[in-house]
Image (cartoon, rainbow, N blue to C red):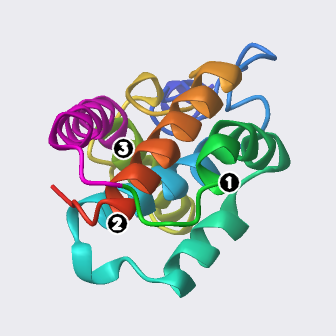
């Protein structure tokens, strides 16, 4: 028996994730792409236009869309541009930045892990050593959806105030 073929590298093989996780729901890579797009929009004012917002919205799952509609409903009644509130803008800027500081590395690792795994299946090139635990794979689905919804509410606030950090 060849030991090298019998051993499983935990970096390249998905593990059985609990039912409540993004990995079990097959949403880890999808949500990673959503988070990376939010990160790009939050840091690049020139990318914020209606088409990009529509593209982002089309990437959202039904549950996130419903939560987002509920969270943004109070803002939708007032179509006038909001009065500039520096304190509120600073709070949302800090909140979005803080959430992205935690989520973006996991999202980038998820995308990198997935692409390396796909590449490894085609060749014998070793991976960079990203562990599945360093990705969104084992993230709780409900908490991840809540965090993405909160990011989107913050992004909406930043867009309404035209404040991109």
Q: Nearer the viewer, mark 2 or mark 3?
A: 2
In this orientation, which residue lies closer to the viewer: 142 or 2? 142
Q: Is residue 27 left or right of residue 35?
A: right
Say whether residue 151 is visible.
yes
In this orientation, which residue lies closer to the viewer: 10 or 77? 77
Marked residue nearer the N-terminal end (2 or 1) = 2
- Image point 52% across, 24% down: which residue? 3
Name the spot of residue 133 as percent of width and height, x first: 44, 22
Name the spot of residue 127 as percent of width and height, x first: 33, 49
Crowd tier of the residue under label 1, counting other residues whose Cα lies within 10 Å: few below 14, some 14–19, many 20 or above: few
Q: Which residues are magenta?
A: 83-104
Q: Badge 3 is on which residue?
A: 109
- The answer for how far apart the CA atoms under marks 2 and 3 are is 19 Å
Q: Badge 2 is on which residue?
A: 41
Name the spot of residue 139 as percent of width and height, x first: 57, 22
Name the spot of residue 82 as percent of width and height, x first: 39, 56
Residue 165 vs 44, above or below: the answer is: above
Q: Is residue 40 left or right of residue 59?
A: left
Looking at the image, do the residues carrying marks 2 and 3 touch, with CB atoms under 8 Å apart? no
Q: Is residue 7 left or right of residue 110?
A: right
Q: Quadrant of the C terminus?
A: bottom left
Label 2 SS:
helix
- Secondary structure character of the magenta stretch overall: helix
Residue 22 vs 96, above or below: the answer is: above
Residue 53 vs 142, above or below: the answer is: below
- Image point 53% across, 56% down: which residue? 34
Label 3 SS:
helix
Q: Nearer the viewer, mark 2 or mark 1?
A: 1
Q: Which mark is residue 77?
A: 1
């Amino acid at each position: 028996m060849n030991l090298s073929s019998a051993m499983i590298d935990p970096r390249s093989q998905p593990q059985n994730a609990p039912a409540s996780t993004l990995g079990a729901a097959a949403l880890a890579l999808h949500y990673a792409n959503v988070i990376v797009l939010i990160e790009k929009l939050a840091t690049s004012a020139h990318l914020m236009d209606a088409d990009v917002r529509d593209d982002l919205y089309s990437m959202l799952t039904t549950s996130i869309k419903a939560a987002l509609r509920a969270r943004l409903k109070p803002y939708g009644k007032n179509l006038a541009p909001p009065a500039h509130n520096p304190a509120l803008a600073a709070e949302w800027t800090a909140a979005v930045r803080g959430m992205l500081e935690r989520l973006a590395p996991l999202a980038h690792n998820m995308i990198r892990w997935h692409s390396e795994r796909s590449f490894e299946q085609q060749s014998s090139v070793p991976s960079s050593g990203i562990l599945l635990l360093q990705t969104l794979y084992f993230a709780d689905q409900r908490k991840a959806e809540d965090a993405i919804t909160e990011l989107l509410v913050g992004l909406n606030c930043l867009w309404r105030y035209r404040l991109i950090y």
